[in-house]
Structures are given as C-alpha cells and as structure tokens.
Amino acid sequence: MVATLFEKVWDQHYVCQETEETPAVLYIDTHLIHEVTSPQAFQMLRDNNLKLRRPDRTFATCDHSTPTTKPNSLGEYQFFGEQEKNQVEQLKKNCAEFSVPLYELGNQKQGIVHVIGPERGITQPGQTIVCGDSHTSTHGAFGALAFGIGTSEVGYTFATQCILQRKPKTFGIEINGALSSGVTAKDIILAIIRQIGIGGATGHVIEYFGSTIDELSMDERMTICNMSIEAGAKAGMIAPDQTTFDFLEGKEFVPKGKDWDIAVSGWKELYTDDGAQFDRRILIDASKIEPMITYGTNPQMGIKIGEVIPSNNETQALKYMGLEEQQNLSGKSVDVVFIGSCTNSRISDLREAAKIFKDRKVAQHVRALIVPGSHEIKQQAENEGIANVFISAGAEWREPGCSMCLGMNGDIIQDKQFCVSTSNRNFEGRQGKGGRTLLASPLTAAAAAVTGRVTDPRELLARNDAITEACEHG
Amino acid sequence: MDKFTSIQSKVVVLNIENIDTDQIIGSDHLKITDKKGLGKHLFADWRYLENAQPNPDFVLNQADNASSQVLVAGDNFGCGSSREHAPWALLDFGIKVVISSSIADIFSNNAFKNGLLPIKVSKQQHDFLLAHHGDEISIDLQNQRISCADQPFSFEVEAFSRYCLLNGLEQLDFLLGQMPQIKQYEKKYSKEPV
C-alpha cells in the first residue's frame, strides 16, 4: 500500500491505534527539554511518585532564560533577574534528580534546543521527537515527525515515553524551480505562510518536496520546517536524502560503522510513495519568490520588499506597527537588527549575513545583535573569521541562546522601536512591550543593519559583485 | 481534576482574530516554576494601561463581564507558542470555556488537560455567538449542546477528552494503564533501555 512520509513514520510509532473513543498512543523516540516548560512536569512526577522512564532518550539544555553576555571573571553568568537564574538552576536540580543529561550554561555543547538536537545527531530521520516548544517542527527537516507539546505532555512523556494523539491530516507543498540570487529559505517560508495563512495548516502535517527543496542545505530545510507552526501546522517534514545523511554522518549520537549503513538503508525508505495522496496539496513556483518582509503582527502579514502594504483591513495590526495601508516599507528607518533564533542562527545564516557586513559598518542609529544558535556555531564562526566581520562592522557578537526572539533573558527592544529580525514571530510585544518586529532573512536583516533602513539585500549583493569585478579587472 | 459537566454563564466576546499565546500570557510570565497566579497577567498588554491601571475599555475589565466563564474569541484562537501557561492563565482568571471558529492544535491539547473546554463551532454559529456579548449561554458537555438567546445547537468534541472532562479523569492515568503495551512496543522495535 502506498503511504506518505508522515504515514510511514506514524505507522512505526503507534503503540495502540486510535479508535472512535480513544486517540492513538504514540511512542516518542526523543524528548528534548528546556528550562521554561519543564519545571511543572518534573513536579508532576514528584506529586505522583513516578519515575522518569527514559532518561536515556531525554536531553536537556537551557536556552530561553539564559544571558547572551559572557560570564564575569569568576565564571558567573549575569542573569537578567532572579527568576531567570532560578529557572536555570531548577533545571539543573531536576536533571540531576532524574538523571537527565543536561547541556548546561558554559558547556561547549549548549545552545538553542532546536539547533543542538541536529548538531549532535540526536535528531535522526524517522524518529518521533517532542519538546515543550512549538518550534520543535524544525527537526522535521530530517524526516522526523517532530512537534511542540505543552507541559502536561512533557510530564506524560517523562512518565510513559508516550503521548495521546489523533492522527493529523496531511498537506503536501511542492516547490519547484531555482531561487533567484538573494532569495533564501526564509523568504520561501514567509511566502508560503502569506499564501496559506497563519491558521492555514491547522490540524495538518506539512510535507515539503520538489526540486527547490532537493537543492536546499539542511540549515535551509530547518528554517522552512521551523516555521511550519506559523501556519498552524502540527509539524513540517522533508524526506531524508543524501544531503541529510552527509549532514548527520559522524555526529556524536548517530550510529557508527556497520550500524550507520543499516540506519541509512532504513532511512532511504522514508519518502512519500508515488500515488500516495495528501489531504491537501499546493504547488509553489520558487522562481517567483523574492526577498520578503513582514509588516504586521503575525507572520502571514508579509510582502515582497518593495511591494506596498496591502489594504486588508488589518487596522489594529497597522496601528500597533505605526504603519499604513499602501505604504512602501523600502527605506523605512529601523532601530534594531536581530540575527539569531532557532529559525536563522546556524552557520550558513551567519555566512550569508557576513557577505553583507563585510567591509561595511552598522549604521550609526542601529543596534545590531548577532546571536549564534550554539557554542559550536559560535566557535565555527570565529574560526572562519565571520565573527570578526560582524565585530569590525560594529555589531554585538553574543553568546548562544534564544535571546531577542522572545526577550525572556532581557534582550529586548524598546517601545515603538522597529526591529528587523530573523526570528519567527512578529506578535505584539514579542520582542519587548510595544516593540515592532519586521521578520526577514539574515541577508535582509544584515542589509537593514548597514543601511539603517529596510533594504532589498540584492542591491548590496549587486554592489559586492561589482566591486569584485572591478578588482579582478583592476 | 474537577468534573466538567455543564456551565451557565454570560458570554464575553473578544472579537479579535488570531489571538496568539504571547498575547494571552506574555513571556515575562513564563519564568515561574509552578502554575499559580497567572490570571492577573492574562491579556496583560491589552488589559492594563501604561501606568499599570486597568484599561476601562478592555472587555474583561468591565464589571458586567468580570464573572463570565465563557469566552467567545475571533478565528484561530491560541496560535503560536506551546506554552501551557495560556490555559493556566485563562483558568486562573475564571474562564472555563473558549469558543471560536478555529482553535490552534497545541492550545486545544493543553486546554483539555487542565479542564478548560475549547469548542470549535461553524462560521455561522461563530457569527451568531459573536453578536451575543453579555447574553446568557449554557454549555452541556454531556449532550454536546450550546444554548444562547433561545438558540440551541450542537457541537463536536474529541471523544476521549470529553470522557476525561465529564469524569474528572487525568489523561495521564490512561497512559499509565497502557504500560504493558508500551513495553511490548519497545521490545518489538528494539527500543528498550540499554
């Protein structure tokens, strides 16, 4: 029988099938946890006198409440406040009590939970992965079924390694064609969310496929799957291929030697069969996608840079943003630029941004904050000289964490400030009370940092090319 | 968990689409390590003025609505973050039912597990309820019936969540009862602890 990628993974993971009366009991291979959504779940174990069943399949890190400044000379981290410090200390105590491995602050393997899972090879094709964080959809880039859960389900997973789930519907998004220069994975997903809407995939698992997806790196695929939740999707998935296997080979937690070969041959079966039906399906022409930017207070409110804000009766959103219908965002002065988050803080994101920052300066009125997704990425960027490009340009080069994506650690923007951000949500107050978020790619964010205005990054990339050409002919 | 059978209350309407969980409870209030006291921070950015005084124009601050237990919200309620703090905050404030034409998946899952009933209704029913702010509404979970302004209609609800709410059962207990099957699954797929 033919099946979609999602159905293949689902069928390998139900302990009991769903019936009219009861949902499926779904087995979870990998449980990722962090300091914000786990404390009450650990308490649930204590209250019910339960053990954490599979500490060997549970991995913890701290990322949301952690400072992105360096520790002082005594090695002490400067938390924003006592609550943040307490939350991180609580995680440490809980992990010690229940024998959960923890990448704590200062550990060279620490970073944003959705960055380090793949980086360590904890994330693998065909797995079920949950985490008390909606951007768990990121891991679907590897052909895993990965989704965010609430704290109750974090507790259920602790206690049983299972959760209860109704089988979601499937949504195929086929993307074909070559991307133009200056257009990134972030622009693809912002264009998709604009098209299908913020609730457009509610109740569905999206599978992305097509020639455009085939050509994308794992970093780019993660950016796309990461924002599936911003269209309401349960999860986003991409079938694993040679790009996936090359990324994973040799990582800490993946099988080695003969076991690797066996694993890969199993993973190669994870694709949607010819003739398998999605409940819903759309086709996207990648060649028509251009650099995107959002103007409103949810991720569906996006436009191509250079387009005007549409007249969609989004009065409250535009009032909050201090913008108007038919206004062109190009040239709009910005105050802050944030490059980071589980959406866009990986090495290829930083390399892209560095193309723009190289030999340029951050505009005088702009604060540019660059926050790598993990210590490993930070180290790599420093080794490659990218970090120096940022620092020479006048940007702040920070320690890894979620940072200004949601501002829990004190990295926030001020009331009415405009921030071009590579994060995933432009909700009211998300980056700071009254703050105005414009979501965009790392290229577009970097372009805004150096010009001080919303700028199509292709203008700067073209100038880069012209300079290179002049030098070569010089 | 307390049993949830039926509710009679006034309707409070918050006719804003895509109310996200950041709006329901801001990330400033996710720093607690228990579940208590979040009601005062519910919809904080809309509910309080800059001087921290209640905004008299915000619907939940108006005396007539202070005791309403049924919130009718715009389409796609609860989108965004997976924070269970959102249903904790609504319940702590006194809301026991949220009705909309679409409710985000993770929010719905989280709501049921805490005794908050999320109800998805048709566009037509939604429009009807949005127009009945302040009216009496009764919600009968046993019979899956809503009645407002003498207009009765039925609603769909996931069967297992309904059963747990009606009987005051924790979903965890059902899962714990599945342990033999879970262990069998682990054995079959060689997923036992090493």
Image (spheres, rainbow, N blue to C red):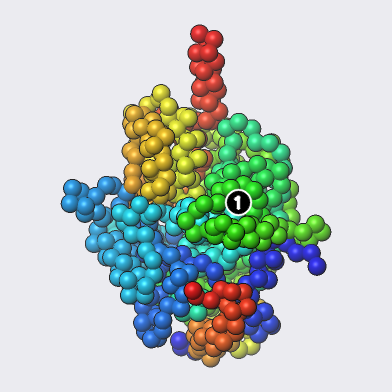
Taking depth in this image into account, of A369 and A210 the one nearest to the observer is: A210
A426 horizontally vs B127: left or right: left
Taking depth in this image into account, of A207 and A325 the one nearest to the observer is: A207
Look at mark 1 in the image and give the residue it sits on: A245
Task: State how many labels appear.
Answer: 1
Image coordinates of residue A238 in percent, x first then y, are 64, 54
Q: Dividing the image into 4 quarters, which one contains the N terminus of chain B?
A: bottom left
Name of the residue lying farthest toward the top: A474
Name of the residue lying farthest toward the front: A258
Label 1 secondary element: helix
Is residue B104 in view? no
Image coordinates of residue A53 in percent, x first then y, are 46, 78
Image coordinates of residue B153 in percent, x first then y, are 67, 80
Q: Residue at position x 45%, y 45% from top?
A: A345
Q: Residue at position x 67%, y 58% from top?
A: A265
| Residue B178: quarter of image | bottom right
| Residue A304: quarter of image | top right
Taking depth in this image into account, of A376 and B168 the one nearest to the observer is: A376
Name of the residue lying farthest toward the bottom: B167
The chain identifier of the residue carrying mark 1 reads A
Q: Residue at position x 53%, y 26% from top?
A: A461
Taking depth in this image into account, of B65 and A305 the one nearest to the observer is: A305
Image coordinates of residue B55 in percent, x first then y, are 36, 61
Is residue A470 in view? yes
Mark 1: few, some, or many residues within 10 Å (few <14, many ≥20)?
some
A273 horizontally vs A396: left or right: right
Amino acid type at mark 1: Phe
Q: Residue at position x 57%, y 87% from top?
A: B180
